[in-house]
Amino acid sequence: MKHFLASTQALCDSAALPDTRVHVRGTRQGALGDQYRLFWNYDVREIIDNALRIRKEGGYDAFVLANSLDPALVELREILDIPVVSFMEVCCFHACTMGERFGLVVPNMKMVPRYREIPTGYGLRDRLGGVEAIEFDNIRGFDAVFTDTALGDDCVAQILAASRRCIAQGAEVIIPAGPSTTLLAERGIFEVDGVPLLDCYRLLVKGAELAVAMHRLTGVHVSRKLLYQAPPQEYIERVAQVRGIDALRT
C-alpha cells in the first residue's frame, strides 16, 4: 500500500504543527483481507509488537491507530504510557460536534457489521445514521486508485454514491473509512450535497497533538481504573519470561 501510505504521509505533514513529526507506517504484510476477523487478528498482533517496541525504546509522544477497525485499542491503552489515539473515536466524536447523526462509508459489504459494532461500543448507537459499502473486496486494490486516474475517479464516484445512501438514512456528517478519506482529501473533496466528508487523517493528527498537549499539561493520558488498568509490573515480567516476549522485559 505504498502509494496510499505516501499520500497519507503528505496529508499528515500538511496538518502537523511545525514541531510535530508524524511517522506513517503500515504492517509488514499489509492488508490481506482485514474484513475477515481471522486475518485481522494477525495484524493486531503486529500492531501490539510495534507498540511494545516503542514502550521499550521510547521516542514517541503518542501512538495513533490509523486503522479504522480499532485494532488492539484496549490492549495498547493498558500497556503504553503515552496517549493512544484511535481513528474511529476521534472521527465519530468529532462528527457528533458537526451534526446529530453520522454515516460511515466502508471498503466492502463484509466490513459493514464490524463498523456498526464500533460506534455502538462508544455508546453512539443512536448517533449512527448508516453504514454503506463501496466495492473493494481486495483491500490492496485501493493502492492503485492513487496512481490510476480512471480507477481513482471510479472510487470517488462509489464513495459519493455510498455517502448519499447514508444521507438518505439521516446522516448529517460522513466518515469515509480507510484509504477513501485520503483519496477525497487529496482531491480536495470535503462535502457532498451540503454534508461534510471528514478529512479523517488530518483530523487524527490534530487529535493526537491535542492528546499530547494535555498529557504534558496534566501528566495524565488515560484512566487506570477498570477498562485500561495496567497489569502490575511483576506480572508483566512473568508473562515476558513464560511467553518469551523480549519487548515486555524492562
Image (cartoon, rainbow, N blue to C red):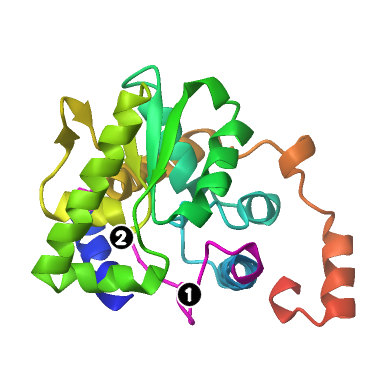
Q: Does the magenta-highlighted stretch encompass residue 171?
A: no
Amino acid type of the residue that numbered disc 1 sits on in the rendered structure: Thr
Residue 189 percent across, percent down from the top left: 13, 44
Residue 99 horizontal/vertical position (percent) = 33, 19
Q: Is residue 27 magenta?
A: yes
Three-letter amino acid code at disc 2? Arg
SS at mark 2 in the image: loop
- Indicate the quadrant where residue 94 lies: top left
18 horizontally vs 117: left or right: left
Residue 200, by quadrant, is top left
User: Looking at the rendering, in which quadrant would you find the C terminus?
Assistant: bottom right
Give percent across and percent down for residue 67: 46, 57
Per the rendered image, the range of residues in magenta is 15-39
User: Is residue 96 shown left or right of residue 20?
Assistant: right
- Residue shown at 45%/76% (left/top)? 30
Give SS at disc 1.
loop
On the image, the x and y values in percent for residue 58 come to 53, 67
Q: Which residue is mark 1?
A: 27
Residue 76 against residue 170 in the figure, above or below:
below
